[in-house]
């Protein structure tokens, strides 16, 4: 749920609806605004699938539910109510939200704290959160004070309730869009749709083939803030894709660029040369979380982590003469066939 990003930092779908008469099946598509950005759905319509109006209604019901549960930009959302609750309190939450807390805790533990769902005080402090002050570099004392209110160790699940030991604030923006894409895909399967491409705020998943037997193809954008340029084209079937980058959401002060990606271990924006990282995973939720995690770690530590964990990742680093790209072994293996440049 990357509300602050005006345009998705991402891989974008290349397939347009087919209108020719050579195929009895056809591609239907729809989309609209969501989570401060947009969503789109393309699917292969057959005699056995619902009409586009029903599919859109089902999709937007999921989007509305996620927004009501997880939007930090709504005072009446469940996550906002949890964030407003005092230290030492517990609040019943839906199983979906508790599952995301568990996933966030696991990613945090596995990465020694590089991933953290409790960064909202720091995001606000640096000007990137839902209750952000003006974009301005905070003092070391302000950062130190905000860091006292972050950390998964201050959360625990008690039956169907989430409890907090300190005045901690949850922010699901690093995984909610991936979760939403997976949830929409599952609902499409239940509706009898076996071939689709779903995208929400830049996270996407493609399953099956188009009516002409070709795979869904997506373009990974080059990390540029002046124009949108395709850097790599991938053929997908059964993969979720997430790209995290620091090139569209940032501010500058005294000639220094400050990224919206905060390193939980320093309490400050990342300073390394990694411009963007794309992760492919059968779970779009995991791709979403892992792309954020690797973006925090940076090019060297991120690649080492991706190799050790078998993560399919594509890194774009700022070099002396332009951008340099590197793929993890799992990414190269996954896209060895059917990849285009």
Image (spheres, rainbow, N blue to C red):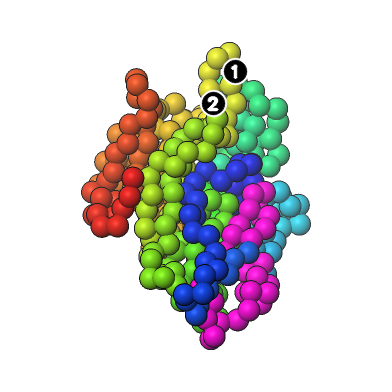
Residue 35 lies in the magenta-colored region: yes
Find residue 165 and name its label. none
Spatial separation of the CA atoms under disc 2 and disc 1? 8 Å
Residue 279 location in percent, x, y? 39, 50
Q: State the residue at coordinates (49%, 46%).
A: 10
Residue 73 lies in the magenta-colored region: no
Labels 2 and 1: the sequence-earlier one: 1
Q: Given the current orientation, which residue lies at the most extreme right position?
A: 76
Residue bearing the label numbered 1: 253
Residue 126 location in percent, x, y? 61, 30
Secondary structure type for disc 2: strand
Q: Quadrant of residue 296?
A: top left
Residue 96 location in percent, x, y? 56, 67
Question: For the magenta stretch, what is the residue range?
Answer: 31-60
Q: Quadrant of the C terminus?
A: top left
Residue 38 location in percent, x, y? 63, 53
Q: Quadrant of residue 214?
A: bottom left
In front of the other: 260 or 165: 260
Against 171, is 131 above or below?
A: above
Find residue 258 and name its label. 2
**Are dots 2 and 1 in contact, CB under 8 Å?**
yes
Q: State the residue at coordinates (44%, 42%).
A: 230
Q: Residues within 10 Å of mark 2 (few under 14, many from 20)?
A: many
Q: Residues within 10 Å of mark 1 (few under 14, many from 20)?
A: few
């Amino acid at each position: 749920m990357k509300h602050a990003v005006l345009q998705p930092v991402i891989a974008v779908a290349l397939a347009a609806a087919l209108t020719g008469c050579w195929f009895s099946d056809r591609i239907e598509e729809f989309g609209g605004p969501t989570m401060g950005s947009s969503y789109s759905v393309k699917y292969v319509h057959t005699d056995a699938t619902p009409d586009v109006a029903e599919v859109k209604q089902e999709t937007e019901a999921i989007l509305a539910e996620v927004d009501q549960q997880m939007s930090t930009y709504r005072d009446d959302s469940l996550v906002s109510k949890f964030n407003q609750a005092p230290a030492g309190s517990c609040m019943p939450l839906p199983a979906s939200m508790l599952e995301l807390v568990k996933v966030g805790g696991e990613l945090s533990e596995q990465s020694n704290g590089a991933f953290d769902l409790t960064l909202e005080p720091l995001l606000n402090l640096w000007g990137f959160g839902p209750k952000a002050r003006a974009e301005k570099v905070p003092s070391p004392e302000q950062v130190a004070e905000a860091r006292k209110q972050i950390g998964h160790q201050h959360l625990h699940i008690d039956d169907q309730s989430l409890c907090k030991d300190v005045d901690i604030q949850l922010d699901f923006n690093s995984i909610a869009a991936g979760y939403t894409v997976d949830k929409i895909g599952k609902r499409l399967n239940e509706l009898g749709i076996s071939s689709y491409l779903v995208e929400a705020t830049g996270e996407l998943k493609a399953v099956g083939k188009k009516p002409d037997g070709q795979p869904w193809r997506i373009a990974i954008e080059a990390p540029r803030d002046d124009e949108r340029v395709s850097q790599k084209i991938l053929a997908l079937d059964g993969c979720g894709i997430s790209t995290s980058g620091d090139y569209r959401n940032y501010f500058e002060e005294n000639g220094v660029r400050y990224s919206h990606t905060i390193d939980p271990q320093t309490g400050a924006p990342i300073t390394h040369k990694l411009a963007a990282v794309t992760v492919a995973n059968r779970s779009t939720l995991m791709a979403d979380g892992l792309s954020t995690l690797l973006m925090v770690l940076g090019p060297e530590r991120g690649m080492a982590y991706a190799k050790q964990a078998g993560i399919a990742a594509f890194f774009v680093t700022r070099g002396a003469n332009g951008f340099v790209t590197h793929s993890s072994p799992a990414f190269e293996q996954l896209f060895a066939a059917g990849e285009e440049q």
